Amino acid sequence: MTAPIENIMRTAPVIPVLVIDDIAHALPLAEALVAGGLKVLEVTLRTPCALEAIRVMKQVPGAIVGAGTVLNPTQLAQAIDAGSEFIVSPGLTPTLGQAAVDAGIPFLPGTANAGDIMLGLDLGLSHFKFFPAEASGGTAALKAIAGPFGGIRICPTGGITLATAPNYLALEPVLCVGGSWMVGKDVFDGAKVDTAKVTAAAAAAAALAR
Ligand SMILES: O=C(O)C(=O)C[C@H](O)[C@H](O)COP(=O)(O)O
């Protein structure tokens, strides 16, 4: 069975947010990230091969593969069918939230304000993505928004880098951060992936302290 979302968030300090344009990238990319210590992989449903990429990446020993950019119950069902072990969304709607709760799958919905978090609490959720973290005001906004909600745990995502991640990871409600910085466009050359470069960037991210 799927692990609760808190266990997933505590697995590594950083969740790579991946956009897979070429299915040939899926396996080497997942292997390189896991080799660097980033085992939790979020595959965004932004590309035609995303669901297939989830299936492929799940073959990598140690990888915990989930779907990102899940917008509605239809995509939720597709993501679960592909074997996703957790679900991430950019925002939270009552329909998606209820469907995720009913499915019993670990779920990290996007929130950007107190109302979003209150909707999640009403659904019985306690773990949230804070998105878009930098554009929404960064650590100052996160601290202010999380303030009234004692028990919640947060994964900020959006505009975070290796240099800024520690500022978020130092905050009490933050269990991990999400980001795409460790897989730059420059690691792809046609179907090939510069796995050494990805593993090195992943290792730097995995070494961040919480
Ligand atoms: O697609 C989604 O569901 C999202 O929520 C967006 C991603 O989380 C960000 O695009 C990652 O942020 P960057 O590290 O700034 O690239």
Image: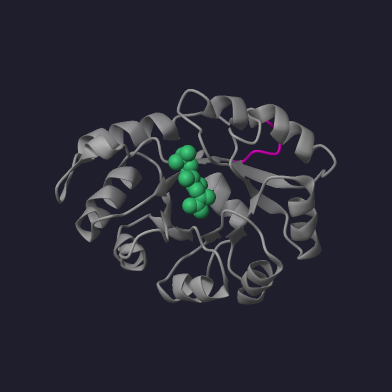
User: Which residue shows up at 70% across the image and 39% down it?
Assistant: 173
8 or 108: nearer the eye? 108
- In the rendered image of this protein, does residue 81 appear above or below residue 91? below
Residue 98 visible in rendering: yes
> How many numbered callouts?
0
* Left or right of 142, for residue 108: left
Magenta span: predominant SS is loop
User: Which residue shows up at 46% across the image and 29% down it?
Assistant: 161
Quarter of the view holding residue 126:
bottom right
Tell me residue 145's x, y (percent).
77, 39
Tell me residue 57's x, y (percent).
32, 60
Residue furthest to the right: 148
148 or 91: nearer the eye? 91
Residue furthest to the front: 135
> Which color scheme is applied?
one colour
- In the rendered image of this protein, does residue 131 appear above or below residue 68? above
Residue 179 visible in rendering: no
* Left or right of 74, for residue 175: right
User: Which residue shows up at 43% across the image and 56% down it?
Assistant: 44
Magenta stretch in the rendered image: 171-175
* Left or right of 105, for residue 182: left
Screen quadrant of the C terminus: top right
Tell me residue 165's x, y (percent).
53, 29
Tell me residue 128's x, y (percent).
66, 50
Does residue 130 belong to the magenta stretch? Answer: no
User: Which residue shows up at 53% across the image and 25% down it?
Assistant: 164
